[in-house]
Amino acid sequence: MDTKRAVQKEMLARRLEEARGRTRFLLGTVSDEDLAVQHDPIMSPLIWDYGHIGNYEELWLLEKAFGRGLSDRDLYDMYDASLHPREERPSLNLLDRADAGLYLDAVRGAALDALEEADLEGEDPLLRDGFVYNMILQHEYQHNETMLQTLQLSGSRYRPDEPAKLPAGDPAAEGEMVRVPGGPFVMGTDDRALALDNERGAHEVDVPGFHLDKTPVTNRAYLEFVEDGGYENENLWDPKGWAWVQSEGITAPKHWYQPDPHSWWTVCFGFDEPLRMDAPVVHVSWFEADAYARWAGKRLPTEAEWEKAASWDPETGTGRPFPWGHEPWSPNKANLDQLALRPAPVGSHPAGASPCGALGMIGDVWEWTASEFSPYPNFQSFPYKEYSEIFFDDGYKILRGGSWATRPGAVRNTFRNWDFPIRRQLFVGFRCAKS
Ligand code: AVJ
Ligand code: FE
């Protein structure tokens, strides 16, 4: 085996170990009781995520890529997300922490054995360039963020021993807009090693020139909308959004409250704290983002506008994988990787600026866009319809850019996330655009 392939396999093996370390770190903070409870009807019990991470690895890596599954069908069935809606998951006979731990170890041992023999240069598109390994890695990263959403919803106290320190913000960046020049750019990618099916293929899109907020909307700006009666003004809302705020009695972002009529506080992983005015607003629905944008005389950017602002370098006429360029993430470029527990003050990562000068495109908060989750031209489902295809054109809105809770290997300029427009459990905010 040549050295390049040996190094590639060694890197994949290390990443698999590193990912598992994070999964176990997150679960290690949670009591057995909290692991088994369903904290919210839209989330799984954390113990389901744990077993599901192992079963996904078994299904795609051992069974599909190598034809060497270990478990019986009942176990596959139990952890198949498309067979069991979340409300059913607590009543399944799930593996407990100790048994799930043994199961994940058995799968992982077999996965590493298989990696030694894998032909990463052959014709099999699952194995070629390590695609299936990268897919299961990203799956574990994605569930790590889901697990943090569950912990935040649970109200249980969660605080790692050493939270990551965040740099100071730049007050001058708040409220500014940058200009993105008009013209065609290349959206999406043809990459078949890392990219997931919905990011393919690369295609030209002509995006007229527009202005984009330099940073995500802050708590300070959002509070002005709240205090200006934004939640009582029907004219600002999409009709479905208006029906939603009315029926749910929604008057502010999720987790906000007023301990007295003059102050606004929030709950961050079980700890009460005053709102940090210079940080992006988080835990807002698409409907709230859309209403704020109308109030501000702006609109949400389309998905194509977002990607062009994050990636397109007019000087070279090419796209960048990350706003700052081709280099991998480092902590000075963006607030990612889960250990800060919150978005940073806006303007705090100037080294992560995109070519047009937009800040915080990756990290801090996911950003709602105006666009529906739809396939790109020439989309081909791979390796399974349940990753993307079954969700297309079904009322999901696109989110871009990852959050502080996203692992660095799970986000890039082309990455597409999606959820329903009423959802607020995500670490999600937004920024506005103007034609
Ligand atoms: C891409 C985040 C929408 O969590 O629902 C996890 C990813 N797919 N397991 C989700 C996913 C299968 C998915 N999102
Ligand atoms: Fe999953």
Image (tube, rainbow, N blue to C red):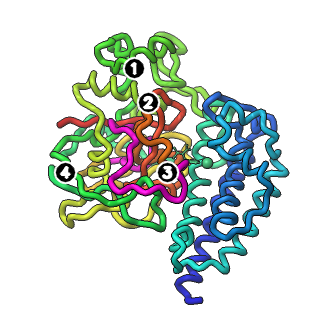
Q: Is residue 17 visible?
A: no
Q: Is residue 319 visible?
A: yes
Q: Is residue 62 above or below residue 72?
A: below
Residue at the spot of label 4: 206
Q: Amino acid at mark 2?
A: Pro
Give whichever of discs 1 and 2 has the lower sequence position: 1
Query: CB atoms at circles 4 and 3 under 8 Å apart?
Result: no
Mark 3: secondary structure: loop
In the rendering, at what x and y percent does residue 267 appear?
57, 27
Residue at the spot of label 2: 421
Q: Residue at x 28, y 14 (%)?
A: 235
In the rendering, at what x and y percent does residue 95 appear?
81, 46
Disc 4 versus disc 1: distance between alpha carbons? 30 Å
Q: Quadrant of the C terminus?
A: top left
Residue at the spot of label 1: 240
Query: CB atoms at circles 1 and 2 under 8 Å apart?
Result: yes
Mark 4: secondary structure: strand
Give whichever of discs 4 and 2 has the lower sequence position: 4
Residue at the spot of label 3: 336
The magenta stretch is 359-388
Q: Nearer the viewer, residue 323 or 130?
A: 130
Q: For marks 4 and 3, give the one nearer the viewer.
A: 4
Give whichever of discs 3 and 2 has the lower sequence position: 3
Query: CB atoms at circles 3 and 1 under 8 Å apart?
Result: no
